[in-house]
Amino acid sequence: MRALQDHQRGQEAERLALGARWPSLGYVFTAPIGTPLDPRNCTRLVQDQCAEAGLPAIPLHDLPHGCVSVLLALGVPPRTVMDIVGHSTLEMTMTVYGHVSLDDKRGALDQLGGLLDEGTPE
């Protein structure tokens, strides 16, 4: 909440500096002149932050996919994940955004193998 309030104060200062030239479009996040953010600039910002943190560049579009996949891997119920990311259907969350890792696949197959081994006489 504090971060949003700080952002709002900064944006208000930008709005006052531009006066009547500030377009009242109702956006929460804008360029310093009140216009919508350019998606390319958002991508550059995220990639610059990744570089500063010593991480590989991550396409902006990959972030929600990664978020959903990590939440599911942590065992968060799919309907909760759907609500967190704001999807209207569980199908969108699970089929488009939820990606199963290779480790998860191996773990599932190991469990299946263990179950099958239990039923095998020695």
Image (tube, helix red, strand yellow):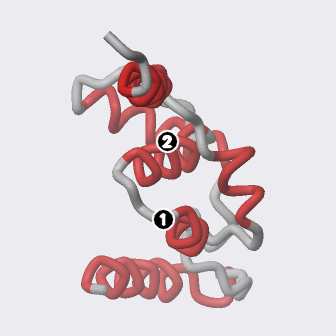
Residue 88 relative to residue 31: left or right: right
Q: Residue 4, percent across and down? A: 37, 81
22 vs 44: above or below: below
Q: Residue 28, percent across and down? A: 56, 79
Q: Residue 101, percent across and down? A: 48, 28
Name the kind of residue labelled 2 in the image: Gly
Q: Nearer the viewer, residue 96 or 25?
A: 96
For label 1, the residue is 77
Q: Quadrant of residue 2?
A: bottom left
For label 2, the residue is 66
Q: Residue furthest top?
A: 122
60 vs 77: above or below: above
Q: Quadrant of residue 1?
A: bottom left
Q: Nearer the viewer, residue 115 or 16?
A: 115
For the residue carrying disc 2, how many other residues have a C-alpha within 10 Å: few (<14), some (14-19), or many (20+)? some
Q: Residue 46, percent across and down? A: 44, 41
Residue 51 relative to residue 93: left or right: left
Q: Which residue corresponds to the image point at 34% horizontal and 32% vertical from the top-left?
A: 50
